[in-house]
Image (tube, rainbow, N blue to C red):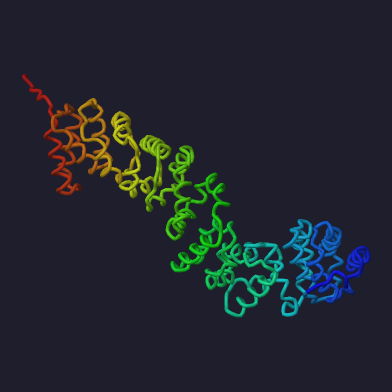
Amino acid sequence: MFFPEILPNSTEFDNWRETIFNNPTQLLSEDFSLLISSLNIVKEASKWHNFMEKMSNLLGSLNYQQRSLNIDKLYELTYLLLCKFDNKKLKDSIKSSIFLQAVQQEDLNLVPSLKYLLALVYDDKIITSTDLIRTEIKEYWSSGNDQKLKETIEFFGKNSNLKLINRMARNSHNKLAQYILAKNYSNVAFTSNSEDFRFIDEVCENIKDEDFKKNYIESLCNNSLIDNELTDFQEDPIVYAECFNLLLSFGTKEVKQKILYVIKNIPTALWNEDLREDKKLLNLFEHDLNLDHKFSEAFANWLAFSMLSKDAHQDKVWVLFHVIERKILDKHNVYGSLKKIFFENNPIQWSSESVQYVSRFWTDISDIDVQHIINKLNLWIDSKEWEQIEWLTELLDDVSLRSEILESRVKENIESEENPPEVKHMLESLLMKIIVEQVTDDS
């Protein structure tokens, strides 16, 4: 317990405090201990502004190299000031090459707070930063064990900053943070920060254990309010697609309902963007989504787009098509509008994976000009699209194809030694649909 009345008056205290850095060679641990205690009493940022200004000027200057060494309370105070006031100039001074070079001289056994101060400043970049961070500090965070777990929780815990562990665990190199979080996933101190909802994909990518994912996300749902993050989710659902997937897999019923609502309200423009590019949102179809016209319109747009434009990742769609199709509204109208485009344009960019679904799109092609069908067959024979040829042949019950060129192609492939028997059999069926007038030479 601290009593304000035992401290000097405000003016005397301020004057004393701002003279501490006048002589870097005479820094005293006791002074910084008193300042740490005073933080519980003098809480206004304005009361510390001049002090932090002087501290920043010293830490980022060559004079700091002449300081008294191994004063751990100096680094603990700096850590606490940054936690409370997030002073940019003070943070920048810690990142300066002068400071990082100066602390190479410190004995890390005597100044344990230094590694936590740098972790606060560099956050999840503590290991990967190219700044001159001491190798021993990077190595400290690069592996986990129970002793380091105890030390780290003790330091961050007494300063009420355990949420920093979650942030650092997002970096794949920070094995200590991951080790700590993996052993404390149900601790409310580690799962009470709602911002962590937006980064569960990164954490779960680094800690792959399924039990951890389930318990960590469930604990986060119970101890944090996801409502604070819904605006970010709604504004950029593509970025948070894997977060949605994890929350739908492991979240509480209430959280799942809120995520399903966000997904239902993804606008057509963002569905269009995702379908044409990375298709991150497609993984969500593993869950029972409730979608409306916004998705249906976007998917119809993608079908038309991918038919005529190359989409290297289209098979991601076709693999899930049996699920996606159930979410399409007015599907017969959608398929009907695509049929004419499909037959009148060459080449079609849909992969062979589409055939099993295309065959269900259109079971009647009587309204298609026969010449378009002939053109399509000529193209498919050259590219050896046997599945598509077989599908189209089966639709030609009452259609006669009049083309000598098509006949020639079919016969050539029937005679070819390269084609297997089943292909030849299918081509023989097609040949029966081709009617060519025989021209006789009367001479």
From what the image shows, is residue 97 above or below residue 244?
Answer: below
Q: Residue 235: which quarter of the image?
A: top right
Where, quadrant-wise, is the N terminus in this rendering?
A: bottom right
Q: Residue 93: which quarter of the image?
A: bottom right
Question: Residue 265's spot in the image, x, y percent?
Answer: 47, 42
**What count of labels does the image hold?**
0
Q: Is residue 255 left or right of residue 8?
A: left
Question: Residue 249's spot in the image, x, y percent?
Answer: 42, 58
Image point (58%, 62%), residue name: 192
Q: Residue 144: which quarter of the image?
A: bottom right
Return the residue nearer the eye: 265 or 179: 265
Return the residue nearer the eye: 378 or 8: 8
Return the residue nearer the eye: 210 or 254: 254
Q: Residue furthest left?
A: 442
Q: Is residue 16 left or right of residue 45?
A: right
Q: Is residue 242 left or right of residue 163?
A: left
Where, quadrant-wise, is the C terminus in this rendering?
A: top left
Return the residue nearer the eye: 47 or 18: 47
Question: Residue 233's spot in the image, x, y percent?
Answer: 53, 48
Question: Residue 216's spot in the image, x, y percent?
Answer: 50, 65
